[in-house]
Amino acid sequence: MTDFISILTHARKFKAAVKELELAELISFQEKLAALIETRKQEEAEAESLNAERNAQIEEIKQKMAALGLSTDDLDNATIKKPKVKREPRPAKYQIEVNGEMVTWTGQGRMPTVFKKEIDEGFELSDFLIAPTE
């Protein structure tokens, strides 16, 4: 709590703080405080009004759901999930023969080690194309 609020909320501290003030200054502070209080009351009344409308709408929805035999669990389970359509795997673009076995690669993702070794030895990636494009 700040010192200011501490003084305002403690009667003896407040009395000591305003002891030196003139009566006209105290009346001015009283009027300003009254205006602040009135503004706060209006803001809270507006918020309460909005909240009352919202609560009325929620209650209306609950009654409709009860009439239909639905619960909030039904709402949670009602999300329509589309079945995942698995796409066809991409065709291999490159191939290399290693120890009598063909290793293929689509050209996407991490390059297989066997291709990397061949490229490090001086080959071009185009040397391993399955169907060279023209």
Image: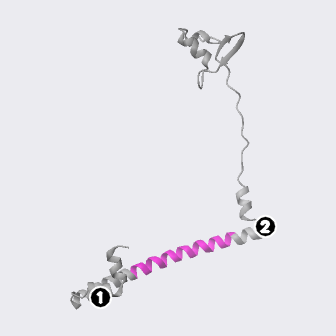
Which disc number belongs to residue 78?
none
The image quarter containing residue 106 is: top right
Task: Give x and y (percent) for residue 4.
Answer: 32, 76
2 or 1: tag closer to the N-terminus: 1
Q: Secondary structure at mark 2?
A: loop
Any part of residue 30 in sight = no
The answer to whether residue 92 is left or right of residue 123 is right
Q: Residue at x 23, y 86 (%)?
A: 25
What kind of element bears circle 1? helix
Mark 2–mark 1 Cα distance, whole angstroms, equals 62 Å
> Horizontal and vertical percent for residue 93?
64, 17
Residue 35 position in % (x across, y down): 35, 82
Around disc 2, counting alpha carbons within 10 Å, would you say few (fewer than 14), some (14 to 19), or many (20 or more)? few
The one of 113 and 131 positioned closer to us in this rendering? 113
Image coordinates of residue 121 in percent, x first then y, are 54, 9
Relative placement, left or right, of 134 versus 1 is right
- Residue position marked by numbered label 1 in the rendering: 15
From what the image shows, is residue 73 above or below residue 7?
above
